Amino acid sequence: MSDKVPNGWKECRLEEVAKIVGGGTPKTDVDEYWNGDIPWITPKDLSNFNGRYISKGERNISEKGLVNSSAKLLPPGTILLTSRAPVGYLAIAENEITTNQGFRSLVPLNNIDNIFLFYLLKNNIEYLKSQATGTTFGELAGSVLKSLVFLFPPLPEQRAIASVLSSLDDKIDLLHRENKTLEAMAETLFRQWFIEEAKDEWEEKSLKDIYIFEKGFEPGSENYLETEEEDAIRFIRVGDMLSHTPSVYIKKSLAKSICSADDLLMSFDGTPGRLNFGIEGAYSSGIRRIYSLNPVYDNLGLKYLIFKSKHIQDTVNAHSSGTVILHASSSIDELTFSFPDERKLEEFNEMITPIFSKMQLNKRQFRILEKLRDTLLPKLMSGEVRVKYVEEEMASCRA
């Protein structure tokens, strides 16, 4: 901990501010322990989770499963923290929930705002990871987690800090939901035009004759930068394509090709078929930038909908191979699609362009908000930036 403690703040061990609870897994060979009404969360459920509140995972357990295992029923507002494989996934329980043994969940006590605690842990993920031990994979022991010391402001200031950060995340969540709605609208139009109302006379074309599949490169992990330094750009890896801010940067001079906000990216390694657009930066060898020299076919919305279509996704997956990491590079030769004439394509492009333009605008907005939130987070959690609040008495931590 820092020697400088902001006025009115206290150093507390986590066990003084929250009850720390482990999880468990009912016997998988007992059918009556499963498929009940109790949500059961595993680290896998949080692997692609970008929100804050979670209500359920892939599986539920039954009352008998709960009683006959070490799983615990956790109240709404509990902070779910993965403690192994990997350490550091975070979520807030939206309702009563249980977890497997890969979690150390924190049930805040009366003197702690649960949203503040969520952001406090979020700001200290790397520190939490550093406290894990183990040879095969790191695990954050409950005894270690309980002993960790952090700074806590008075409860009203906790709530004020949580309100500032939550308001930013609420706006980000709203923009994400709007984009999902817009994408669903575009997919409905695409299905109507190109599936339900497709004509027999449309020509089936090989997509490699229409599109260029430009492969990215690997700069080497020794060239990764963790912060956006001067003359640095984002480096997009396959795992980053589900997030909104790639986790590493590289020197711009290393980049062989740079993606713009109007490009479409598709992964051909790792998780073949994963799509994203509007990411600016260089991209890895497992990703292809897809573009056409013909502007009618190069419309961002049209490209996105074609390559997300079931036919294309099924083809990519069918031609993926590999024991540890899947590769789908050869699937490019198998990708075909039936197209109407260019006049019809132009008509469709005119319909969907405003939809995707709005989605792009939303993406730019929530990236600005994410950057603001990530800038404010450490400053608010350290007391470097203070917020106004109504004075209340804070329950003191034990000595």
Image (cartoon, rainbow, N blue to C red):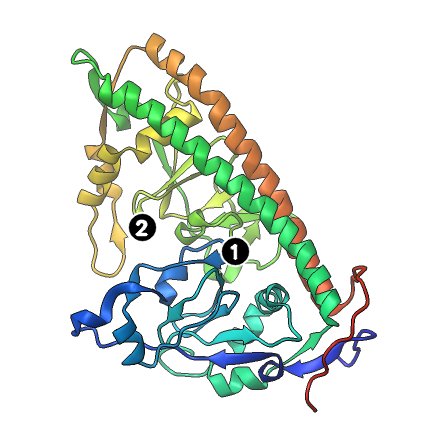
Which residue appears at 51% of the width and 68% of the height?
A: 79
Q: Residues within 10 Å of mark 2 (few under 14, many from 20)?
A: some
What secondary structure is marked by label 2? loop
x and y, in percent, of residue 182 in the image? 45, 31
Q: Quadrant of residue 386?
A: bottom right
Is 62 placed above or below 363 here? below
Is residue 384 toward the left or the right of residue 301 in the image?
right
Q: Residues within 10 Å of mark 1 (few under 14, many from 20)?
A: some
Tell me if residue 25 can be seen: no
Is residue 90 toward the left or the right of residue 349 in the image?
right
Is 215 placed above or below 36 here? above
Q: Nearer the viewer, residue 4 or 38?
A: 38
Residue 134 numbered mark, or none: none
The quarter in which the N terminus is drawn is bottom right
Q: Quadrant of residue 379?
A: bottom right
Check disc 2 and report the residue beneath it: 271
Check disc 1 and report the residue beneath it: 247
Q: Which kind of residue does numbered mark 2 sit on? A: Thr
x and y, in percent, of residue 112 in the image? 64, 72
